[in-house]
Amino acid sequence: MRTGKLKNNDSEQEDPYTGSMRESIRKVEATREERIESEIPLMDPEEREEVLNEYHPDYKESGMRPLKAGPNSGDEMPLELADLLEAYPAVEPSEIDLTRVDYEVDILVIGGGGAGTVASLWAVKQGIDPEDILIATKLRHGDANSMMAQGGIQAADGEKDSPAAHFLDIVGGGHYANKPNLAKALAKDAPGMLKWHENLGVMYDKNEDGSMKTLHGGGTSRKRLHSAKDYTGMELMRTIRDEARNLEIPVEEFSPAVELLTDSEGTVTGALLYNMETEQYYVVRAKSVVMATGGFGRLHIQDFPTTNHYGATADGLVMAYRAGANLLDMDSVQYHPTGAAFPEQIVGLLVTEKVRGSGAIPVNREGEAFVYNLEPRDVEAGALIRECYGRNKGVETPTGMKGVWLDTPMIDMMHGEGTFEENLAYIYRLYTRFGIDPTEDPLLVFPTLHYQNGGVEINEEGKTAVEGLFAGGEVEGGVHGKNRLMGNSLLDYNVFGKRAGISAAKRAKEVGWGEISLQHAVKYSQQLEEAGIDEDRRSPMLVPEYRGEQTLSRSIDIL
Amino acid sequence: MSEDAEKQTVEIFIMGKKYEVPRGLTIMKAMEYSGYQYIRGVGCRGGFCGACATIYRLEGDYKLHTDLACQTTVQDGMYLTQLPFTPAGREGYDLEELDISNNPLLDLYPELARCVSCNTCTKTCPQDLEVMDFVNEAIRGNIKEVAELSFDCIQCGLCAARCPAEIPHHHVAQLARRIYGRYQAPDSVHLEERVEEIEAGQFDEKLNELVNLSKEDLKERYENREIEE
């Protein structure tokens, strides 16, 4: 058996938990046996509503403002996103020479995460030559939230389950704001996507007879969550990336798209890429463009820490919006209930819902359970915030952050020694690296910014409102309504990555290359000027700013 | 405790150049604090993607340590550099056409046979995997063992960079996992049956009914739905 090496400190391991935290842990330990025996009831609909209204960050009015330009004018958006949407192009259109085209492809896929990779693979299945596809991505192929998903993927393949039951969970969890046809597609395609994965060699957790091991997730009515330990996202992403490499689908890394290109009708006809290392731009003409840039976690909405990867900066939303795409449900942000709140080095990182799915329960400073462990994510997050700030029963860390305990030692007590390390290898490794053994001690958690529930509106074929532009994965909206359930994001990038890829391929077979220009961006800038937006504001952001203040305050640009 | 341990800052050497940073930061955050804005060498920041492979030595110690910049706390006297890319060769293949009767791992990666069992790969692995063990299993053609031992591999490439036999361990392991998942793990019969049922349109009527319900009716169905124990 592998044991955590506790690398970050010398062999004489000091207890990372402080005296007062340790004192609270003793109370958690004292009530543990009793907690395993007892059952916490689900919240009734009235209490759910109250928790959301009073404590969920989406319901805080000062965090939003209505947009002043573009198709969603008047719609409330998080301030951090509004700043990027109400911004001028990062590249100056007049400085770009579009007469020299660097790439002419059938399909340009913007984003090298799960959705972009799936779209490419299915475009090839539609008969597109891999050479006629280009994946342009900001970091490396596979550097994406897709790689980080831990808990699993939903699919109604169980005997007691059905796509209809899955559909109900999706729309109920999404507060009925979902586009019904998108929710239907998500539920209906799910088993087929898992079958595809099986054929690609994905190692799902299975029983001896090949049947899938499944668990409940927050808000599921059936045990529908399929996993590959707690590296589900990594196992899926690395497998589909491997397949894309076998097919030799071209990938431009470190070269994000920074603006779409359009013809005089507004049809998307390509994109401008920017090589972040050499600082040169590339002009791409494409018959179809698939937007697959993921979400906006790195905007740190309302100053929340995030589980997201470094590149999750809403670039695709910005580009698509400038080209005229409509955005849905941008007022709804998913805060995952259980982000790490301690130790400081890992604050914000995800502690998968599979931990609660396996039986661990949130517990307050006094050792009291206060919420059912598998409420839908927004409700569970609201309940944790209420416990810390409404009822003042949180545990304070040395940096002043508050959190509640997630009683992880329950898992091995309920399911046998070794269960945690076997099924939650990532979490085990994450914490033992910093001297905390989750089978011995509970983990301190607090909600963390996790997912963009909304996004660019698509139809069930993955088409946006803009001709020539398709979208799949976290960048698109309408699938999850106001709240995505666990295990439906990996599923989303598969289902809508596939649908977008197929639709993009069909279009590419029917149309030729169009004229390319930046006129949509120029037009949008005029709208911004009329709305009086400060000209210094530029987007897309590409990478977040984490440099030390002292350095930035004395930074000059000479080279 | 020495005086140094009580100081609120530590001295680190980023590619040999000295910076003073707050104690307790990860290597990644310490580099950012010092003024570096990442393009290379950063990805998920959570220990999944392998982009931030780092090699370091501590003052007064001859050993070269390897770890992930996002998962490692800075220490006083740390000399560090990142290794954001390993030029390890990867062989393409067609999973459906692969001859698995022999040892496909050795067929595609004959350099496996150059392993001298020095165990450097295992000592290098930031995930603490038994890398040399799975290389040995790969040489023997034990695909399942390679797949299982390598499952937590994040493909950072540090092992391949340090290997005196120049084996691309992470690519070998990826191949083994896919062969195992495709050909050796038992198929899920209920999954296949469900896919057939869906393709036969068995759930369409029910789904279409739900799609067309009013919000109120949907709400009622949702709140009264049966929940599996």
Image (tube, coloured by chain):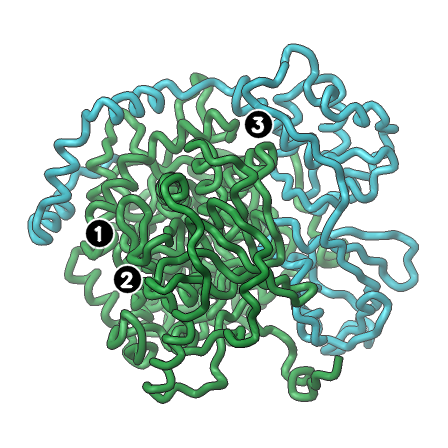
Element under disc 3: helix
Image quarter of residue A390: bottom left
Chain designation of label 3: B
Q: Which residue is mark 2?
A: A328
Chain designation of label 2: A
Q: CA distance from mark 3 to mark 2?
A: 38 Å
Residue B163 vs A318, above or below: the answer is above
Residue A303 vs B99, above or below: the answer is below
**Same chain? Circles 3 and 2:** no
Q: Which residue is mark 1?
A: A179
Residue drawn at the location 42% of the way across and 55% of the way down: A514
Q: CA distance from mark 1 to mark 2?
A: 10 Å
Residue A248 got which mark? none
Task: Report if the CB atoms under discs 1 and 2 are less than 8 Å apart.
Answer: yes
**Residue type at mark 3?**
Arg
Q: Which chain is green?
A: A
Element under disc 1: loop
**Residue type at mark 2?**
Leu
Q: For mark 1, does the 10 Å Cα neighbourhood hold few (<14), some (14 to 19), or many (20 or more) residues?
A: many
Q: Where is residue B93? Give x, y as percent.
A: 63, 26
Query: Looking at the figure, which quarter contains the C terminus of chain A?
Result: bottom right
Q: Earlier in the sequence, mark 1 or mark 2?
A: 1
Nearer to us: label 3 or label 2? 2
Chain designation of label 1: A
The answer to whether one can see residue A409 in this image is: no
**Same chain? Circles 1 and 3:** no
**Residue type at mark 1?**
Lys
Q: Which residue is mark 3?
A: B178
